[in-house]
């Protein structure tokens, strides 16, 4: 950083050169931009170079130090601070110096420490002055913008700001919105809006090489600028070239995108309200010009925006593919959905309605499956996206994340439901195995496809339904044969077999013996135990 600008004025060249070597000007916050050996030359330098501080001797030829100060203060063209360096300890000089607002009075021979401390104090004051002027300028420019936008700026104010903006009679004026898109949401403590405004201001200064004043105004989540047509000369009068340069200067991350919206040009500052209103209209064409991120009112306004609802077949297709976990088809449907927004010239409000309809449809599916919406990390940003600046591609990425996460969660819920459902089916079989039950009958009771139920049962328990039911009936038959004296046909009837012969066949298939052989073996073993006792 170069620091504050200073001029040395003294008719003694050795004094000037000695000061240059004696003081560490950079450490004190200054650099010497020029020197003069008399007051008249110094006056010309001051008017031309506009320094922050003038360090001058009192007694000089042609024009002395006090007269130099008086002329600068009286003309009121430039307002530098003055430090007087003099070998004359004269109270009258000091009195006059105070009257002219001189900042400090340093006596020769100069004490390096004293002079350096004086310079440091002045550097801090200059910084404070700059900050105060910047705050005042921002307040004034903000007030001007507000008055222009609502069409209430009086003539004197308009003339003042035309002078400040260095407008020429032939200049056209544009109102331009600059908008940052796809930027991560700021935390409550971040000053993203202010930082972005500063970045825009710096970019504009770079584009104009610091020669064109600009006034910026914050509009909620975008920055408004009055752009004189003269600034477009560097871009062959092309609004698009200026917009591209702004985009290149401002984008600072891989996904962040800068959108620029031009209103219709006007011929006078008093007509800026119309330029502002047409810039607002340009905002409505944002998604139509998503690829370039540049909207120029004269080009965009020839298109009629549509405020139509979401195509029903796309909506139904989207929900089905989310529920069925068809991820590749889902991505294709989302692509078609967002292409239709552009092709059919959807207005932002229509896009918002369509997206909200899809989100609500997914939430209803989750609710019907007793899902917990809070488990979707993408749901909150998806329901609040319209409060942020998102390009169509940024919105597409956000919506795709939401759709994919929702599909995965629905798949997880279905697994949990199936797991719980198959347990209920097993409990039902165990309670009703003695009845005339079948896979088809149970599937109908639980509103399931019989083939799917059979596959699900095999996956859950490692055996087919019929084998499970047979094993269950045989195990119960063995218990009855051990603990009762029921006849074989009565046991068959108790465990769900209508035909005793079929019961015997199936029992033998599992146990490698008939029910009678099973009971006789138990009786022999019991008799043998009694004899041994």
Image (cartoon, grey):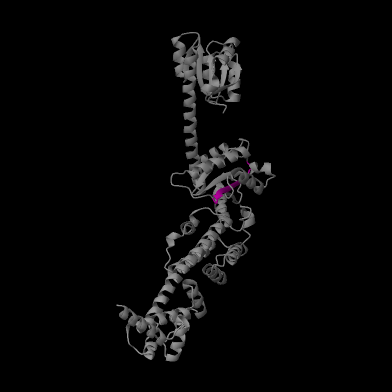
Which residue occupies 68% across, 41% down? 234
Report whether 280 appears left or right of 471: right
Count of picture labels: 0
Which residue occupies 63% across, 59% down? 302
Report if residue 303 is visible in the image.
yes
Which residue occupies 45% across, 89% down? 502
Quarter containing the C terminus: bottom left
Report whether 356 appears left or right of 261: left
Q: Nearer the viewer, residue 400 or 372?
A: 372
Quarter containing the N terminus: top right
Query: Which residue reaches farthest left?
Result: 533
Please say if 257 is above or below 24.
below
Report whether 301 appears left or right of 520: right
Q: Nearer the viewer, residue 465 or 122?
A: 465
Q: Is residue 427 magenta?
A: no
- Residue 247 lies, in percent from the top left, at 61, 46
- Residue 65 lies, in percent from the top left, at 53, 14
- Residue 511 lies, in percent from the top left, at 45, 81
Report if residue 170 is visible in the image.
no
Please say if 77 is above or below 292.
above
Write down the region rendered in magenta: 169-182
| Secondary structure mainly formed by the magenta segment | strand
Please say if 139 is above or below 111.
below
Query: Which residue reaches farthest front?
Result: 532
Q: Nearer the viewer, residue 420 or 35?
A: 420
């Amino acid at each position: 950083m170069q620091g504050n600008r200073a001029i040395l004025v003294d008719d003694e060249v050795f004094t000037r050169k000695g000061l240059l070597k004696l003081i560490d000007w950079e450490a004190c916050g200054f650099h010497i931009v020029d020197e003069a050996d008399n007051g008249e030359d110094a006056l010309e330098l001051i008017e031309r170079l506009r320094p922050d501080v003038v360090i001058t001797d009192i007694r000089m030829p042609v024009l002395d130090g006090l007269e130099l100060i008086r002329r600068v203060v009286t003309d009121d063209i430039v307002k530098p601070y003055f430090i007087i360096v003099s070998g004359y300890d004269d109270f009258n000089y000091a009195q006059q110096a105070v009257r002219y607002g001189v900042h400090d009075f340093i006596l020769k021979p100069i004490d390096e420490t004293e002079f350096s401390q004086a310079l440091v104090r002045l550097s801090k004051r200059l910084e404070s002055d700059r900050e105060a002027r910047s705050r005042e300028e921002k307040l004034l420019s903000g007030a001007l913008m507000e008055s222009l936008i609502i069409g209430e700026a009086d003539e004197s104010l308009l003339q003042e700001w035309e002078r400040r903006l260095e407008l020429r009679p032939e200049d056209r004026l544009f109102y331009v919105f600059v908008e940052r898109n796809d930027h991560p949401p700021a935390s409550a403590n971040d000053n993203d809006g202010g930082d972005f405004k500063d970045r825009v201001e710096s970019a504009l200064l770079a584009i104009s090489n610091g020669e064109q004043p600009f006034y910026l105004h914050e509009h909620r989540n975008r920055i408004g600028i009055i752009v004189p047509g003269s600034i477009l000369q560097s871009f062959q009068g092309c609004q698009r070239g200026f917009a591209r340069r702004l985009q290149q200067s401002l984008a600072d991350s891989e996904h962040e995108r800068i959108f620029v919206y031009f209103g219709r040009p006007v011929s006078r500052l008093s007509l800026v309200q119309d330029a502002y209103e047409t810039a607002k209209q340009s905002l409505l064409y944002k998604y139509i010009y998503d690829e370039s991120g540049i909207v120029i009112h004269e080009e965009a306004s020839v298109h009629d925006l549509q405020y139509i609802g979401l195509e029903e077949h796309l909506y139904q297709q989207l929900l089905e593919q989310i529920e069925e976990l068809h991820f590749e088809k889902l991505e294709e449907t989302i692509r078609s959905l967002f292409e239709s927004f552009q092709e059919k010239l959807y207005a932002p409000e229509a896009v918002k309605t369509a997206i909200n309809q899809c989100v609500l449809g997914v939430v209803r599916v989750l609710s019907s499956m007793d899902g917990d919406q809070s488990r979707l990390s993408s749901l909150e940003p998806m329901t609040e996206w319209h409060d942020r600046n998102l390009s169509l591609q940024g919105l597409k990425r956000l919506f795709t994340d939401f759709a994919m996460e929702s599909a995965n969660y629905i798949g997880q819920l279905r697994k949990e439901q199936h797991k719980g459902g198959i347990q209920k089916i097993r409990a039902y079989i165990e309670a009703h195995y003695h009845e005339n039950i079948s896979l088809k009958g149970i599937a109908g009771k639980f509103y399931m496809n019989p083939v799917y139920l059979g596959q699900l049962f095999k996956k859950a328990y490692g055996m087919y339904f019929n084998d499970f039911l047979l094993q269950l009936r045989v195990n119960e038959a063995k218990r009855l044969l051990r603990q009762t004296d029921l006849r074989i046909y009565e046991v068959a009837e108790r465990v769900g077999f209508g035909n005793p012969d079929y019961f015997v066949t199936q029992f033998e298939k599992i146990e490698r013996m008939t029910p009678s052989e099973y009971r006789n073996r138990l009786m022999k073993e019991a008799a043998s135990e009694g004899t041994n006792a």
